[in-house]
Structures are given as structure tokens and as C-alpha cells.
């Protein structure tokens, strides 16, 4: 008898009248919101303007969704284009199926377009949003829980996920690989945040660290999964993808550190110009106050000198009167 396990939702969709609210889509939406919110905080800390991350996300997110879906459909084409399958299902993104590799690749293209329009270096933007993307993945993986997909081998561990009978799945208790990846992504985000503060990562190295760390976890988690996948030399396709992308990310960190050490001083020229203008205006205001103060001091000094002169002139003005009084006294004495 199984005493402990993680139950699966009885349904992945809740109907609010005629409007269906799907758990998978809801998790993705929350993940995007968290990524943009936290990315904006990091962008401001780097000297950028508020709202820039969201403006560029308007380009990056749609590109990322299309890229993620394309990667899934291409690598699992048999699910949509084999005999007896309906190719229209390839467009039903709410039923699950987003490949992170395609999402990052095409999402980067969208981000590049948005950055170019605002004159922002893409590597600096990528560094700012890297932890947020990892947090978004951690949240998005719970969409697989709603769809009862992406689980591992059978297990009797107390944190096993209970899967019910359905299309292309058998009822039983399995490793919750979606949960493993969710927790791993949280760890990746915290690692990037710590490393960025400790080593002052720049020029895209924080993003490359996120990619390398994620690939490390995805490799062993992918090995546990039992869903259908293409194999190359005995390994699942996504395991090979993790190995290759990991190597590329590490190579970028090493080469970038040698060619462009340190971090960008200015990440958004418009924000830097605004800061300079504000500082200059404040400096001009201080200069005017100093000038006014100097005039006041001059006026006060002049007043003091005038008063001192008047005081000195006082006794001099009374000398003729005293002389006249002495002459009058002398004349009176002579008469008497």
C-alpha cells in the first residue's frame, strides 16, 4: 500500500463560463511575469531605465514561444505527422510541448531585435534576465504536472507522482522529473545571482553560466525520463543537446573573460544621458546658490564697513562745537 505520493490534478483545465483556464498556460504566464519583474529589478541595479526589460520582452516572448514549439514539433515530429496523427495538433500549444532550447534560441533573436531598436547591448540584457528565466522555468515546469507528462521511471519513493490512466500513459507512481527540474532551476537562479555578485559578471557571462548550469541538471534529469524520444548512440537527443550547449556555454565564459574582462559600465545610453543631465542641473543650481550667498556676504561686509566708518566719523564731527564752546567760556571769563 502506498502511503505517500504527489497526486496529479484530475483535470488540467478549469472553465470560467465559456473561458477555459488551462494550468499549463497559466504556469507559463506566471513564469513570464516573474522573469520580467525580476529582470527589471536587476536592470535598474545595472543603471538601466524602468520598463526597458518589459519593452524588449514584447519581442522576446513571442519569438521564444514560437521557437520552443518549433523545436518540440521538429524533434517529436512523429507525434504530429505520422500515419493516423493529426498535423493540426502541432498548433495546440496548450496541450504541452515547448523545447527550452528552441525557446532560448529564437527568444534571443527577438531580444536582439528589441535591444537593437533601443541601442542596448544584448549581452548586458541577457545577464540581467538570466536568473529570471531560470525562475520562470521552475514555475513553468508545474504546467507538466497539470498535463501529467514528463515523469520518470516507476518508483515507490514517498515523493513519487501518481499518474492516472490516459492517452499514451499508464497509471502508476513515477519519479516527478518535472519537480526535479523545477527545483534544479531554482538552484540555478540562486547560483547565477551569487556568482554575479561575487565575481561581477558581465558581457553575457551571467547568462552563459545559467545555460551551463541548466544543461548540467537537464542531462541527468533527461536520463530518468521514460517518455518517447529519439536516441543517438544510445542517448536521448536532449542529452546530446545538453552536452553540446554546455560545452559552448563554458567556452564562451572562458573566451569572453579573456577578451572582455569586467562588466559594462553603461548598459543603456539613454539612462546614462538622463543621469548626466540631472547631475548637471543639480550642479548649476548649487552654483547659483553659492553666487547668491557670496553677494549677500559682500553686501553684509560693505554694510559693516559703512557702519564702522560712521562710528569713526562721529567724534570728528563734534570737534568744531567743542572748540566754539571753549572760546565762549574764555570770553566770559575775560569780561568778568
Image: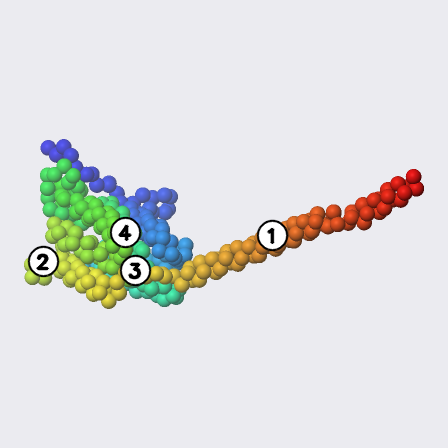
- Image spot of residue 61 (x, y percent): 32, 58
Q: Is residue 250 visible?
A: yes
State the residue position of label 2.
235
Viewer-nearest of discs 3 and 1? 1
Q: CA distance from mark 1 to mark 4?
A: 50 Å
Element marked by disc 3: loop
**Disc with the residue nearer the chain's start (1 vs 4):** 4
Residue 5 image position (x, y, % from top left): 16, 37
| Residue under numbered circle 3 | 263
Q: Real-space Cα distance between discs 3 and 2?
A: 38 Å
**10 Å neighbourhood of mark 1: few (<14), some, or many (≥20)?**
few
Residue position for label 1? 297
Q: Residue sitting at 23 percent across and 50 percent down?
A: 191
Does dot 1 land on a helix, a strand or a loop?
helix
Task: Give the residue at the far right of this rendering.
Answer: 335
- Do the residues under discs 4 and 3 have CB atoms within 8 angstroms? no
> Helix, strand, or loop for circle 2?
strand
Q: CA distance from mark 2 to mark 4?
A: 37 Å
Badge 2, how many Cα within 10 Å: few under 14, some, many 20+?
A: few
Mark 4, residue position: 197
Image quarter in which the C terminus is found: top right
User: Local crowd at mark 4 within 10 Å, few (<14), some, or many (≥20)?
Assistant: few
Dot 2 or dot 4, earlier in sequence: 4
Question: Vertically, is 208 above or below 168?
Answer: below
The mark nearer the N terminus, 3 or 2, is: 2
Q: Earlier in the sequence, mark 4 or mark 3?
A: 4
Amino acid at each position: 500500500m502506498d502511503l505517500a505520493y504527489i497526486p496529479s490534478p484530475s483535470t488540467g483545465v478549469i472553465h470560467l463560463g465559456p473561458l477555459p483556464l488551462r494550468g499549463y498556460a497559466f504556469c507559463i504566464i506566471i513564469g513570464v511575469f516573474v522573469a520580467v519583474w525580476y529582470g527589471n529589478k536587476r536592470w535598474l541595479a545595472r543603471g538601466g531605465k524602468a520598463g526597458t526589460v518589459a519593452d524588449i520582452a514584447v519581442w522576446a516572448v513571442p519569438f521564444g514561444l514560437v521557437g520552443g514549439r518549433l523545436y518540440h514539433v521538429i524533434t517529436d515530429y512523429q507525434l504530429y505527422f505520422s500515419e493516423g496523427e493529426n498535423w493540426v495538433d502541432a498548433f495546440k500549444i496548450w496541450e504541452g510541448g515547448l523545447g527550452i532550447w528552441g525557446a532560448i534560441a529564437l527568444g534571443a533573436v527577438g531580444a536582439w531585435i528589441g535591444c537593437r531598436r533601443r541601442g542596448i547591448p544584448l549581452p548586458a540584457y541577457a545577464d540581467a534576465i538570466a536568473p529570471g528565466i531560470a525562475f520562470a522555468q521552475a514555475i513553468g515546469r508545474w504546467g507538466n504536472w497539470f498535463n501529467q507528462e514528463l515523469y520518470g521511471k516507476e518508483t515507490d519513493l514517498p515523493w513519487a507522482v501518481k499518474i492516472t490512466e490516459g492517452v499514451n500513459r499508464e497509471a502508476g507512481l513515477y519519479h516527478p522529473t518535472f519537480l526535479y527540474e523545477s527545483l534544479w532551476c531554482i538552484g540555478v537562479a540562486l547560483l547565477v545571482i551569487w556568482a554575479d555578485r561575487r565575481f561581477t559578471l558581465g558581457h553575457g557571462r551571467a547568462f552563459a553560466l545559467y545555460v551551463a548550469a541548466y544543461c548540467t541538471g537537464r542531462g541527468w534529469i533527461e536520463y530518468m525520463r521514460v517518455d518517447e524520444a529519439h536516441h543517438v548512440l544510445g542517448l536521448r537527443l536532449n542529452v546530446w543537446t545538453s552536452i553540446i550547449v554546455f560545452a559552448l556555454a563554458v567556452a564562451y565564459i572562458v573566451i569572453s573573460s579573456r577578451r572582455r574582462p569586467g562588466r559594462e559600465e553603461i548598459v543603456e545610453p539613454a539612462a546614462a544621458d538622463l543621469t548626466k543631465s540631472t547631475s548637471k542641473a543639480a550642479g548649476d543650481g548649487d552654483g547659483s546658490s553659492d553666487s547668491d550667498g557670496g553677494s549677500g556676504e559682500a553686501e553684509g561686509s560693505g554694510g559693516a564697513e559703512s557702519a564702522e566708518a560712521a562710528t569713526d566719523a562721529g567724534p570728528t564731527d563734534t570737534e568744531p562745537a567743542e572748540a566754539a564752546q571753549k572760546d565762549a567760556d574764555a570770553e566770559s571769563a575775560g569780561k568778568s
